[in-house]
Amino acid sequence: MTLTDILHNRYSVRAFKPDPVPEATLKEVFQLAQRAPSNCNVQPWQTCVVSGAKKDELKKILVGTVMKQQTPQPDFNWKVAYEGVHRERQFGSANALYSAMGIAREDKMQRNMAMLRNWAFFDAPHVAFFTMDTYLDIMGAVDVGIYAQTLTMLLKERGIDSCMQGALGQFPQPVREFLGLPEGRGVLFGMSFGYADEAAAANQCRTERAELTDAVQFIG
């Protein structure tokens, strides 16, 4: 599978089969991802991959935390409110997902239940938390984003699906405690991954991309 094939076929998977990825494959993928570029080669990512019974334990903690309806307290700035075309794309993405799942716009309960599945890792067998030292701020976040993109491409090359989740950075305190992160380390975001349940309604969702002329300007 070429990189072009991967980009055309990859999508955010929101329902997974329970089958775990073989340990040897996990180590191979994460070892290769160490080749991802970063500013001045600082490699700021500190990734925690949680699987099996520990993953299920963390899932229960996070779902319980979210159901208390507390205000998110992220380690990094997740307070950006989308405007203009960015807000339109956000709504378009949500509409595509909920339409695929047969959830009406006015059905707030079902939408909330669908949202809650973020913290249940969409029943994926594995979840990765991308953490870094908080002082690194935007520079570190850029590097971690490049690293995470590298990971998802490597996974898809091996038939393994994933979903990047900003939601997994919204309630970092129980995650930090569970993972035993040191002082000064923050949870940026997460990624659920495994093998897609292709029959699931949520996995029928596809989103559009902006035209090249809207995204890129060629000069010279």
Image (cartoon, helix red, strand yellow):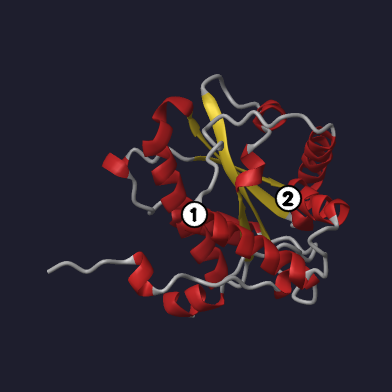
Q: Which numbered circle lies on residue 118?
A: 2
In this rendering, the answer to whether 33 lies above or below 104 is above
Residue named by callout 1 = 84
Q: Is residue 87 left or right of residue 143?
A: right
Q: Position of residue 189 (x, y in %)?
A: 58, 43
Q: Is residue 162 left or right of residue 137?
A: right
Considering every residue shown, the one lying at the far left of the view is 220
- Which label sits in the foreground, 2 or 1? 1
**Nearer to me, 131 or 67:** 67
Q: Position of residue 161 (x, y in %)?
A: 63, 66
Q: Amino acid at mark 1?
A: Gly
Residue 38 visible, this orientation: yes
Q: Quadrant of residue 42?
A: top left
Neighbourhood count class around disc 1 (C-alpha, 10 Å): few under 14, some 14–19, many 20 upward: few
* Residue positioned 60% across, 31% down in the render: 74
Q: Position of residue 36 (x, y in %)?
A: 38, 53
Q: Is residue 85 left or right of residue 171?
A: left
Neighbourhood count class around disc 2 (C-alpha, 10 Å): few under 14, some 14–19, many 20 upward: many
In this rendering, the answer to whether 215 lies above or below 52 is below
In this rendering, the answer to whether 122 lies above or below 6 is above
Q: Quadrant of the C terminus?
A: bottom left
Considering every residue shown, the one lying at the far top of the view is 183
| Residues tagged 2 and 1 counted as in contact (Cβ below 8 A) | no
Q: Which numbered circle lies on residue 121?
A: none
SS type, badge 2:
helix
* Residue positioned 65% across, 57% down in the render: 23
Q: Is residue 75 left or right of residue 43?
A: right
**Nearer to me, 151 or 204:** 204
Q: Amino acid at mark 2?
A: Asn
